[in-house]
């Protein structure tokens, strides 16, 4: 007999109840775009997990599952019609990657803006049948700008995210950090600097430098003490496929 934990029972219950929103309330097309249903529902399930079982990043299992596929040759584009997917590509393109993509979008927009836009999408399209571009347009409105680069790279390609710290140099009043964009998927660079007294400083390199064609970006961050650690994506909200090159530590 196979035994399941109480948490596993909660997970599957939360997932199936979340289907009341998609596709029961918002009539998305699973045969063509399963990510609009299963991926969104997986994301909603993970947020319910956080409420019921706090103290753990419940987005992380989907993120790790997607990263494992992204490191292989088994990935398929999310915008490929679901019933036309390659063998083995349908599940990650329908569940783990779209759930992970929504977390990345939330990191970029901020929790408040994303939550309001996500809820407005559900309210606006209840009892209707949205297409992918309806969802994209709703999030563009929330962002206050076109996010075409985001939709194309995440949904229409299988490019992966790989940002690497190339160098960290001391300068007057801070450090100069150079980041190399190893992968093809452009995203802002979220930097966390740890000082000798264990305090931290956050810095962001905007995505525009990658969109302009650069492969390296340099930023100077002012600090009140000696920097001992620099890390890209310390909260691990983005699915970087090689975290070994995300960290610089003073020797």
Image (cartoon, rainbow, N blue to C red):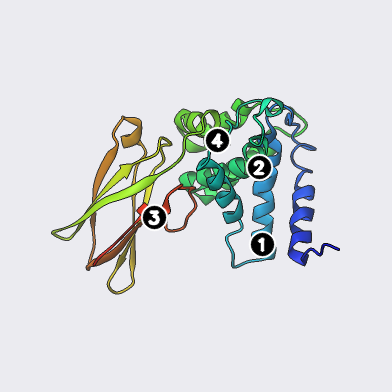
Category of crowding for the residue at label 1, using alpha-carbon neighbours closer than 10 angstroms: few (below 14), some (14–19), many (at least 20): few
Q: Which residue is mark 4?
A: 139
Q: Which residue bears the numbered disc 1? A: 51
Helix or strand or loop: what does disc 1 sit on? helix
* Front label number (4 vs 3): 3
**Label whose residue precedes the other's in the sequence (4 or 2):** 2
Q: Is residue 145 left or right of residue 75?
A: left
Q: Residue at x 40, y 44 (%)?
A: 162
Q: Report the mark closest to the observer, 2 or 3.
A: 3
Residue 244's tag is: 3
* Left or right placement of residue 222 versus residue 118 in this view: left
Cα–Cα gap, marks 1 and 4? 25 Å
Q: Position of residue 122 (x, y in %)?
A: 69, 38
- The tag on residue 202 is none
Q: Which residue is mark 2?
A: 95
The C terminus, quarter of image: bottom left
Task: Tell me what residue is drawn at x 70 percent, y 64 percent.
Answer: 52
Residue plotted at (69% across, 56% down): 48
Side of 80 relative to 158 (left or right): right
Q: Are marks 1 and 3 in contact (CB under 8 Å)?
A: no
Nearer-N-terminus badge (1/3): 1
């Amino acid at each position: 007999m196979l035994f399941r934990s109480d948490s596993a029972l909660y997970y599957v219950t939360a997932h199936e109840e979340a289907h009341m929103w998609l596709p029961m309330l918002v009539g998305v097309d699973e045969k063509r775009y399963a990510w609009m249903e299963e991926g969104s529902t997986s994301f909603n399930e993970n947020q319910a997990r956080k409420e019921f079982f706090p103290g753990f990043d419940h987005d992380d299992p989907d993120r790790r599952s997607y990263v494992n596929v992204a490191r292989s040759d088994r990935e398929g584009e999310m915008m490929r019609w679901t019933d036309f997917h390659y063998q083995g590509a349908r599940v990650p393109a329908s569940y783990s990657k779209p759930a992970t993509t929504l977390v990345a979008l939330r990191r970029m927009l901020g929790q408040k803006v994303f939550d309001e836009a996500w809820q407005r999408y559900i309210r606006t399209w209840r009892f209707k049948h949205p297409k992918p571009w309806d969802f994209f347009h709703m999030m563009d409105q929330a962002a206050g700008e076109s996010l075409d680069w985001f939709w194309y790279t995440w949904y229409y390609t299988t490019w992966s995210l790989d940002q690497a710290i190339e160098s960290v140099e001391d300068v007057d009043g801070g450090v100069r950090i150079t980041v190399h964009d190893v992968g093809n998927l452009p995203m802002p660079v979220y930097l966390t600097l740890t000082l000798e007294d264990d305090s931290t400083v956050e810095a962001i390199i905007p995505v525009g430098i990658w969109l302009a064609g650069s492969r390296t970006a340099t930023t100077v961050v002012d600090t009140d003490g000696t920097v001992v650690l620099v890390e890209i994506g310390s909260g691990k909200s983005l699915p970087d496929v090689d975290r070994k090159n995300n960290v610089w530590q003073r020797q």
